[in-house]
Amino acid sequence: MPRHIIEFFWKPGHSWSPAEREQVSEELRSIARECFGSVPEYQCLAKTEAAFNDKLVVIAREKTTRKAVAFTSAILLPVDGVEAQTIVHTGLTCILPQNQGQGLTHLLFGELALHLFDEFKYGIWFSNLAAVPSSLVNVGNSARDPFPFHKAGAPLPVHMHIAQTISENYRPDMNVSEDAVFDYQTFVMKDAKNSESPMLKDPKDPKIQHRNVTMNGFYHKLLEEKGSEVLQIGFWDPMYIHPALAWKTKDWRHIQILLKNQPAYLVHRFGLRALALVLVFLLFGSLSLLQPKSG
């Protein structure tokens, strides 16, 4: 039986009452306080009326007590010239220390993906800013064309375009200092966090490593300077992510949404010929099942 209830909210600042906004804000700030020691005043944790207006918020609650124990808050950012003219920034994820290791990261991201790909049926470009090797490896493994990644070569033009747009326009949304220097060769944001930031991470902390030592080493080299963070850009493809999350979370809604959106996706990505081939394959497969068996 599931131990947690997962709640999803799409830009809830436009529909919540002031009392609802205050209640959820305090719940999320309480989780962040236990994770970071103090509350960073940005993203959904900011004490402003507009804090939830552009966020996609997922909250995990204990089923018996309804206590909030984890959350993730992503943000949609306009970027001209990419799929859907929008990217999603992975944003902020916090899990109470005593609830870590319970599979909540997959549950939070799984719920986000269900709603995100129901809206963006053909996939969406994303950004991830982190100094946590396990996060960078896991997010990179979930993506098409991730950069920087240990298997990637040089950044593609679309990587450069998104990174430049972020560096020039969206630093406040990512809690990055205007004085930070972005390296367009390595995609490292140098001095992204100062020494007093509650979100400053030691990239070699044993608690935040991936099980793949080679991948850890790749990001350790990029994050040698204290306070640096990697800006990771990639494309989330629903045809890949839905099956993977269905397997990890045992939430078969991923397969339902995948099947519902598959014809439109195939036409969008491969053209009408691809859809026609799939339909012909399914037709012949169905006919073969209907053939009477000899003997």
Image (cartoon, rainbow, N blue to C red):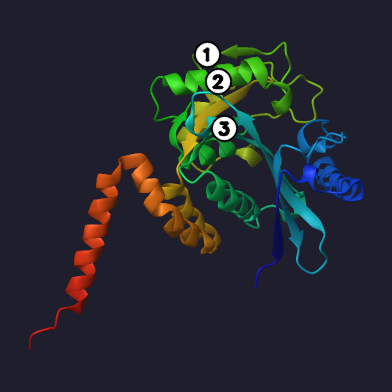
Does 158 appear above or below 256? Answer: above
Residue type at tag 3: Ile
Question: Does the CB distance between marks 3 and 2 fall below 8 Å?
Answer: no
Q: Nearer the viewer, residue 99 or 5?
A: 5
State the residue position of label 3.
87
| Relative to 150, 88 lies left or right | right
In the structure shown, which secondary structural element does the residue marked by tag 3 occupy?
strand
The residue shown at (54%, 51%) is 118
Q: Can you see residue 163?
A: yes
At x 59%, y 32%, the residue is 128
Q: Amino acid at mark 2?
A: Ala
Other-residue count near label 2 (Cα within 10 Å), few / some / many at <14 / 14–19 / ≥20: many
> Circle 1 — which element?
loop
Precedes in sequence: disc 3 or disc 2: 3
Considering the numbered disc 2 on the image, is that residue within a helix, a strand or a loop? helix
Q: Tell which tag, 1 or 2, sits nearer the viewer.
A: 2
User: Between residues 153 and 273, which one lies in front from this camera angle?
Assistant: 273
Q: Is residue 96 left or right of residue 144?
A: right
Disc marking residue 117: none
| Residue 224 in view here | no
Q: Are marks 3 and 1 in contact (CB under 8 Å)?
A: no
Nearer the N terminus, badge 3 or badge 1?
Answer: 3
Residue 203 position, x and y percent, is: 63, 29
Tag 1: residue type? Tyr
The residue to which callout 1 is attached is: 184
Mark 1 is surrounded, within 10 Å at the Cα level, by few (under 14), some (14 to 19) or many (20 or more) other residues, namely some
Q: Is 117 above or below relative to 41? A: below
**Residue contact between numbered discs 1 and 2, judged by CB atoms under 8 Å:** yes
**Image vertical order of residue 26 relative to residue 89, above or below:** below
The residue identified by callout 2 is: 163
Quadrant of the frame with the C terminus: bottom left
